[in-house]
Image (cartoon, helix red, strand yellow):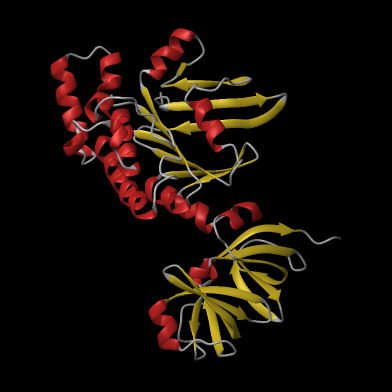
Amino acid sequence: MTAPHLLEASELEVVRGGVRVLSVPSFVLGDKEVVSLVGPNGAGKSTFLLALARLLPVASGQIRCRGEAISSDRATFAYRRRMAMVFQEPLLFDGTVFDNVAAGLKIRKFSRKEIAARVAETLELFDISYLAERSARKLSGGEAQRTSLARAFAIRPDIIFLDEPFSALDPPTRQALTEDLAHILTKTSTSAVLATHDQLEAIRLSDRMVVMNNGRIVQTGTPFEIMNRPVDQFVATFVGMENMFEGDVVETGRGMLTVELGGQRVQFPGSADPGDTALFCIRPEHVTITTTDTHGSTSARNVIPAFIGGTSHAGVFDKVSLDCGFPLVAYVTSQSFGDLHLEKGTAVFASFKAAAVHLMHVTKKNH
């Protein structure tokens, strides 16, 4: 018999002011698993997180922890003792950092000796042992959030719920804390559900990502699947899939499609019939730019002549807008950008592998 998941939710609905704001038919969280809830503002991430934590009443549905229904007051109380919650703003009270981290242990009636040992261990885990006797009211934003996280981890919860925990921090502090949290979650084998709108944060921390929109789950998958194989245009747009196209299928065979697009032909894996319309996408990072025709000398099936329409900086990459008869965006490293002398109007070749193209939808032709 298969062991139950650590956390399961089924047919979960939340209603506010007579309006259904959350509808989730099914969700599971496994042992030692980290799942992130991602989506734009107002997608329902925090509502879903609070419902899972039993901190928000649900109109219908069921939540189970290790197979046990969390329905009665007694079951809810027992469940809350096995979980911890961290919010965007650290909810610290007057007293020292030690006092704050010890709070959950005191409620659970740990002995003084046990509390001292557990707090010392957790402060060291978050690299804030030196703050133990400092007033919680005199902490920086990063120190306060580390204290809040340490308090949550000190009780060694089965599940930790994190609601946009780093969104108020400056980028360097946020990055450092994200890296530390990733290490700590692995070291402690703690299961977690994280609500965030930051894709890089979700990718770094998560085993699975759950994309939400309008209170519903749109797609669930590994970070790679979400970023590279979006199920629809909403998810594709959210994950930064700047190259989305619709073209007519002109040839099929051996599991490959050939699509007419702006006077060019693009080949990629898929199933359709000639005359159908294919909706597909390509990540900008998967497009390579060369100044010579690489037909026959590269594994890329698609090599297309193009002109550079414009360039701009995009973080660690340079963004190049191409005119291939259809608009195509490529991201290249700054070094490649300089080496290739990419300027507006330059004639180049854009190439990408067939496997880099993701088919999202096929519209059947009218018979």
Question: Would residue 181 be found to the left or right of residue 303 on screen?
Answer: left
The picture places residue 273, in percent across and down from the top left corner, at: 73, 64
- Asked where in the image residue 33 lies, by quadrant, the reply is top left
* On-image quarter of the C terminus: bottom right
Residue at the image point whose x is 44% and y is 11% from the top: 75
The picture places residue 284, in percent across and down from the top left corner, at: 53, 69
* On-image quarter of the N terminus: top left
Residue 184 drawn above or below residue 172? above
Q: Is residue 301 visible?
A: no
Q: Residue furthest right?
A: 367
Residue 40 drawn above or below residue 45? below
Residue at the image point whose x is 28% and y is 14% from the top: 108
Residue 266 drawn above or below residue 102? below
Residue at the image point whose x is 45% and y is 44% from the top: 208
The picture places residue 157, in percent across and down from the top left corner, at: 32, 26
Which is nearer the eye, 236 or 261? Answer: 236
Residue at the image point whose x is 64% and y is 52% from the top: 234
Residue 315 drawn above or below residue 69? below
Q: Is residue 242 visible?
A: yes
Which is nearer the eye, 256 or 61? Answer: 61
The picture places residue 301, in percent across and down from the top left corner, at: 54, 77
- Asked where in the image residue 171 lies, by quadrant, the reply is bottom left
